[in-house]
Amino acid sequence: MECSFSTLRDKGLLKGTIKEAKRKRADRAAAQYSTNKRTEYRVIELGPDDTREVDLLAYDTFPRRQRWASARAEGKTFHASAEDKFWDWKDELSWGVDEVDAGRYSRRCRYRKINYHPFVKSYGYATETRLVATIWDKRYRYRAPRGWVYGMDTLGIYIRRKNETRATFRYHLTSDDVRGGLAAMRAAGIQHERQRREATRSLRAQKRATKAREAFRKMLPAVGVWVSFEDSQKVGNCASGTISWGRSHGLDHRKRYPYKLIEKLSKTHYSIDRVLAAAEDRTIDDLERGYCLIN
């Protein structure tokens, strides 16, 4: 893609910088779901508060029912076609209980298992600057906070900073966020950004640690790996079994033995490969630490 941008710039067809052109392209790609058409509604998943509330309502309304399943958000069930228009029965309800047939209990039993899913109306649509949503039986209309924009994708309705184009930094709204107002949505977006940055730092640190361990692993042939009784116990082998196995091959469990010697006996027991891997990991730990913990 960068090569194409460079070609356009060389031909004089690109105005501005390549970075700015990439940003505009990403905005156009994200805007394919941002529309004023009110037929493109998105389901807004339930937050913990709404989930708890509809669960309690369902349990109180139908106390004798069993096999309750998790509560879920229900979208706009209005359907339109070229010939006619019709409404689903759920259109008239802000919440309810959906019955799902889960089959018979057994071949001999004629009774069927019914799962009950409480649901709440929770859907909406968004443009970059406006959000319109219906939660339970209430309509919400918001303008985007300063420096933030709304958007829609296959996962729902999200909020992000205006200058942030990375998809991982999109925070998809829940019904609790929408009912909480602009402050709640903005705070949730900021918290999501913080979690994403922490996850990125953790992943980078993990990659650096993995790279360092691979460098130490390449040093093992030169340093030498010794296998001990503790390595066998570390992988879950019992002490008595380890001592018995060692005695049958003329080995003393109080001593350490070279890696290659134990490797030759790898076919005598299924756990030898795991013991060798544990010895390698312990040796790498010793190299990273700078000293050995075994005598």
Image (spheres, rainbow, N blue to C red):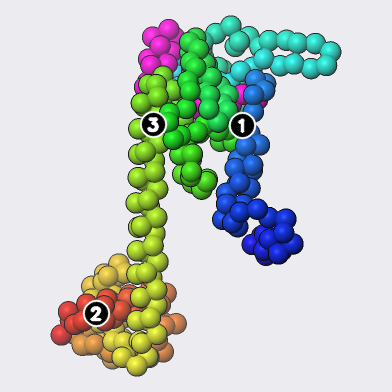
Q: What stretch is highlighted in magenta?
A: 40-64
Find the distance from the CA under tag 1 to the CA under tag 2: 55 Å
List the residue tagged with mark 3: 186
- Please give the label number shown on residue 34: 1
List the residue tagged with mark 2: 286
Q: Nearer the viewer, mark 1 or mark 2?
A: 1
Question: What residue is rendered at 37% in x and 69% in y?
Answer: 208
Nearer to me, 132 or 237: 132
Nearer to me, 271 or 129: 129
Q: Quadrant of the N terminus?
A: bottom right
* Tag 2: amino acid: Asp
* Tag 3: amino acid: Arg
Q: In this view, does 286 lie to the left or right of 136?
A: left
Question: What residue is rendered at 56% in x and 55% in y?
Answer: 19
| Residue 280 visible to the viewer | yes
Q: In which quarter of the image is the C terminus?
A: bottom left
Relative to 12, say whether 75 is above or below: above
Does 283 lie within the magenta span? Answer: no
Question: What residue is rendered at 79% in x and 17% in y?
Answer: 81
Find the distance from the CA under tag 3 to the CA under tag 2: 47 Å
* Tag 1: amino acid: Ser
Residue reaching furthest to the left: 295
